[in-house]
């Protein structure tokens, strides 16, 4: 019986080893070795992809390449996001011939994607203003 109680207590208080602070950062030595909090990136990638598609339809590699230059993510990070956005009806896809190889799969923002983008942008502005007030950044 003591074992079962101990097992329950272990799960109830979620005993996990304490990870060093560096665990939350991802080093990207190909881009100057700068560290960026992985959790920050995870929270905004959908918003970033939808925002990029608002400007124009883009193919996967183009999106991945642009994002990886700005936010320091691997190219492979974008494709699961694109699949999720397509499954959720935020984007549609179409193939377009390429002069430099096989046809490319382009992603286009849908009406639902546009509405979601507006909502996410408003949430982001509210959230970032609140965080900036706390950390002392520009609150505008």
Image (tube, rainbow, N blue to C red):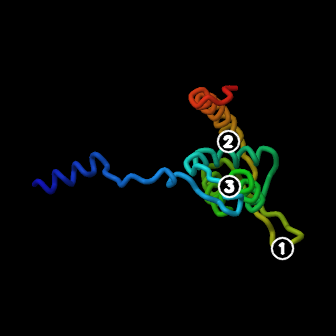
**Position of residue 113 measured from the top left corner of the image (x, y, whole percent):** 68, 43
> SS for tag 3?
loop
**Residue 119 falls in image quadrant:** top right
Residue 116 in view, yes or no: yes
Q: Locate the N terminus and report the quarter of the image it occupies.
A: bottom left
Asked if 12 appears above or below 76 in the picture, the reply is above
Q: Residue at the location (76% across, 55% down)?
A: 66
Mark nearest the camera among 3 and 2 is 3
Front-most of residues 105 and 69:
69
Q: Residue at the location (76% across, 48% down)?
A: 53
Front-most of residues 33 and 107:
33
Q: Are marks 2 and 1 in contact (CB under 8 Å)?
A: no
Asked if 66 appears above or below 47 in the picture, the reply is below
Q: Locate the C terminus and report the quarter of the image it occupies.
A: top right
Q: Earlier in the sequence, mark 3 or mark 2?
A: 3
Q: Residue at the location (58% across, 45% down)?
A: 40
Mark nearest the camera among 2 and 1 is 1
Q: Earlier in the sequence, mark 2 or mark 1?
A: 1
Q: Earlier in the sequence, mark 1 or mark 3?
A: 3
Asked if 72 appears above or below 122 in the picture, the reply is below
Q: Which residue is mark 3?
A: 72
Front-most of residues 28 and 68:
28
Q: Which residue is mark 2?
A: 112
10 Å crowding of disc 1: few (<14), some (14-19), many (20+) = few
Q: Is residue 40 left or right of residue 13?
A: right
**Position of residue 82 measured from the top left corner of the image (x, y, whole percent):** 66, 56
Q: Which residue is mark 1?
A: 101
> SS for tag 1?
strand
Residue 106 in view, yes or no: no
Front-most of residues 108 and 61:
61
């Amino acid at each position: 019986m003591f074992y079962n109680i101990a097992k329950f207590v272990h799960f109830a208080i979620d005993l996990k080893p304490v990870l060093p602070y560096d665990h939350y950062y991802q080093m990207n030595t190909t881009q100057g070795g700068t560290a960026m909090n992985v959790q920050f990136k995870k929270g905004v990638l959908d918003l970033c992809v939808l925002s990029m598609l608002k400007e124009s339809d883009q193919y996967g590699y183009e999106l991945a390449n642009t994002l990886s230059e700005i936010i320091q993510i691997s190219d492979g990070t974008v494709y699961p996001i694109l699949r999720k956005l397509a499954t959720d009806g935020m984007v549609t896809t179409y193939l377009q011939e390429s002069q430099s190889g096989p046809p490319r799969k382009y992603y286009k923002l849908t009406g639902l994607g546009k509405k979601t983008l507006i909502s996410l942008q408003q949430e982001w502005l509210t959230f970032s203003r609140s965080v900036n007030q706390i950390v002392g950044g520009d609150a505008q």
